[in-house]
Image (tube, rainbow, N blue to C red):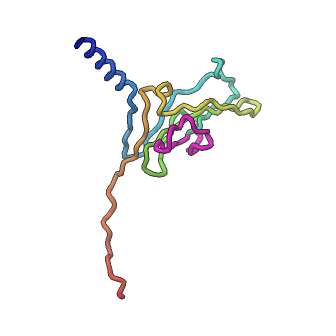
Amino acid sequence: MRRILAIALFFALALGCVSAQETIYYESTPTLMWDAVTTDADGNPFLPGDIIEYEVYLWDYSQGDPTVQPVTSLTYFGTVGVTEIGLTFPYRADWTVAVRTKHTDGGGNITYSGLAYSTVLEDTATGPFVYVPQLIWSPMDPTGLRDSGM
């Protein structure tokens, strides 16, 4: 019985470690990277005239699960033609990032992929994560204290 309990405990701990969300703390601008998209959803390679870009979105994780939000509720960060982007956040919070592919064919028709989220295991290379900005420097002490004269 003890052996079965020990094995069950081991698997419960292992599962907890695998499913745990990693938090990335940083003191400067982090760089988000992802794999290049080279084919369409059916596995067909893009044509030479096709343009592939990536749209990046932010979501304050304290506001709930980002995966159930419409893309219009996410904060648009920018569009890039490369597979990385330096991030800056509007305020201190736990930030989820999401990326989707924007495909423009030679005729100017635009299609989009679904969103890939930093908090979804299947979308990440090393496991789910959020960004948490940290204060780099303490603010200066106030100076010039004075009475109003009244």
Q: Is 101 a magenta residue?
A: no
The part of the chain drawn in magenta is 57-80
Say which residue appears at 38% left-offset and 38% top-offset.
Answer: 24
> What is the residue that sits farthest to the right in this orientation?
107
Q: Is residue 99 above or below residue 44?
A: below
79 vs 11, left or right, is right
Q: Is residue 96 above or below residue 145?
A: above
Q: In this view, does 144 lie above or below 79?
A: below
| Residue 50 on image: x %, y % | 69, 28
Q: In this view, does 47 lie above or below 4?
A: below
| Residue 14 on image: x %, y % | 33, 21
> What is the residue that sits farthest to the left in this orientation?
2
Quadrant containing the C terminus is bottom left
**How many marks on residues?**
0
| Residue 68 on image: x %, y % | 57, 35
67 vs 11, left or right, is right
Name the image quarter holding residue 128: top left
Q: Which of 23 and 43 is in front in this view?
A: 23
Q: Is 62 a magenta residue?
A: yes
| Residue 21 on image: x %, y % | 40, 32
Q: Nearer the viewer, residue 66 or 143?
A: 66
Say which residue appears at 48% left-offset and 29% top-offset.
Answer: 120
Say which residue appears at 74% left-offset and 32% top-offset.
Answer: 109
Q: Which of 46 and 71 is in front in this view?
A: 71
